[in-house]
Amino acid sequence: MNLSDVKAQIQASSAIAVVEQTFEKIEKNKEFNAYLSVCKERALEQAKASDERRKSGKSLSVLDGVPIAVKDNMCIEGTKTTCASKILENFVSPYTATAVAKLEAAGAVVIGKTNMDEFAMGSSNETSYFGKVINPVAKDRIPGGSSGGSAVAVAAETVALALGSDTGGSIRQPAACTGTVGIKPTYGRVSRYGLVAYASSLDQIGAFSSNVEDLAPVLNFMCGQDPKDNTTSAEPVPDFGEQLGKGIKGKVIGMPKEYFAEGLDPKCKDVIEAALAKLEKEGAVIKEVSLPSIRYAIESYYIIAPAEASSNLSRFDGIRYTHRSKEAKNLADTFSMSRGEGFGSEVKLRILLGNYVLSSGFYDAYYVQAQKVRRIITEDFYKAFEVCDVIASPATPGLPQLAGVSESDHLSLVLSDLYTASVNLAGLPGLVQSCGKLDGIPVGLQWIGKPFDEASLLGIGDAFEKLP
Ligand code: GLN
């Protein structure tokens, strides 16, 4: 289901009818556990207003009346924002995240909040306090995480568009695992105001859709500088659809040799290489590039992200808006017992790791070193971009892993961030789309772009999607 299908349905009936049908679809697809809550009253009210605008010829945009799903780590005034954690089980947001507010100002209707790995920590969507998300395209496999709920909301065709957040791959990996399209914009493109922070220097809001083209209007409305987030960039917001339909003749695609080497499932490698060969036939130029420091990306990411997380999560203390332990008898107990009861084990692991690498004695050896490595990785990417327009890469090391992997093989999940976390470390935009199937299971292809060049990613992704 894509955006034009939804637009046609609204035209033929009404936004209210489409919103009601969406709730029915969510109900029918409950087995996937993609949604944590729905915003019924709010959505119906907004749909009603949208219908009135349409009748008087004053529709706000192409998104007017279109239902969207939002990951449950983005605040929406008056609705629950749980981050799929017990500690925020009953937290109701007092304000709305800028990214969501901007889409609502364009007429989009938020239909519900989607399941995720707890506090966006994970790659399997198995760490949610509210149960794991099932992958509709391969039920025995993970849907990818941490924005698995949003990816599945699109893959199961409950909505055409969904928002996610990506700190080390949390939009792009679920897109790969579910055969949807996902984009993580450049760091600073989209305001993080109202996004519950995981690792502030890496987090970025992005979106899922069923085709590349549909991401353009979402980015057009969602991006831009925000006075409430001083890490947003003043870089002008282009029309992200400007390169759609322009083909790929003459585009230089960089293929990092380190990405197509050991660690990548050979069968997936074949599918990706066959996809790139098709583009070459259409006039793209494929060039080998090198990202020599990329082998340190996981180490650097898994020091920096937990360090920032341990600091960001210190605000959940049992005093303010979180779960409070009933057993606590004094202040110190309130802190430790509320956190002990409220956080799941993956989150606790990150907090311990983060505090460890930030503690005196280890700070220089781990944290400072990881920051230096981050700089070198970024420079590797910039160097590669001197000779190519975009970089092609796998999204994950292989097909989506079998469900249960977060317990059975935690390390392999960490390693699955290799191709995506490096992109966050460098602050670059990345788009993932499906480039073929193996035994009916989608294989993801990632396009990595120059800073603020999301338009090229959409252009090339669209060209690939439309290949004969
Ligand atoms: N898998 C990575 C982690 O757990 C990335 C998660 C994300 O992008 N939010 O940190």
Image (cartoon, rainbow, N blue to C red):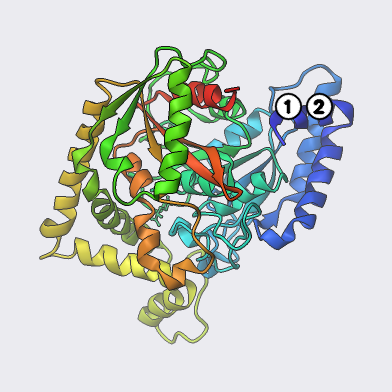
Looking at the image, which residue is at 47% across and 16% down? 248
Q: Examine the rendering and report whether any part of residue 395 can be seen.
A: no
The number of discs equals: 2
Q: Position of residue 45 (x, y in %)?
A: 79, 41
Relative to 130, is 436 above or below?
above
Looking at the image, which residue is at 39% across and 25% down? 452
Residue nearest the observer in this picture, 106 or 186: 186
What residue sits right under mark 2 in the picture?
8
Three-letter amino acid code at disc 1?
Ser
- Asked which secondary structure carries label 1, the reply is helix
Relative to 457, is 404 above or below?
below
Q: Position of residue 216 (x, y in %)?
A: 57, 25
- Asked which secondary structure carries label 2, the reply is helix
Horizontal arrangement in the rendering, residue 433 relative to residue 260 (left or right): right
Task: Report how far apart the C-alphas of labels 2 and 1 lie in the structure.
Answer: 6 Å
Q: Position of residue 65 (x, y in %)?
A: 75, 32
Horizontal arrangement in the rendering, residue 130 relative to residue 267 (left or right): right
Relative to 266, is 336 above or below?
below
Mark 2 crowd level (few <14, some 14–19, many ≥20, 10 Å Cα): few
**Mark 1 and mark 2 in contact (Cβ < 8 Å)?**
yes
Looking at the image, which residue is at 47% across and 48% down? 173
What residue sits right under mark 1 in the picture?
4
Three-letter amino acid code at disc 2?
Ala
Query: Most extreme residue toward the right, as rendered?
Result: 13
Residue nearest the observer in this picture, 324 or 306: 306
Horizontal arrangement in the rendering, residue 58 relative to residue 240 (left or right): right
Q: Quadrant of the C terminus?
A: top right
Mark 1 crowd level (few <14, some 14–19, many ≥20, 10 Å Cα): few
Q: Quadrant of the N terminus?
A: top right
Q: Examine the rendering and report whether any part of residue 308 can be seen.
A: yes
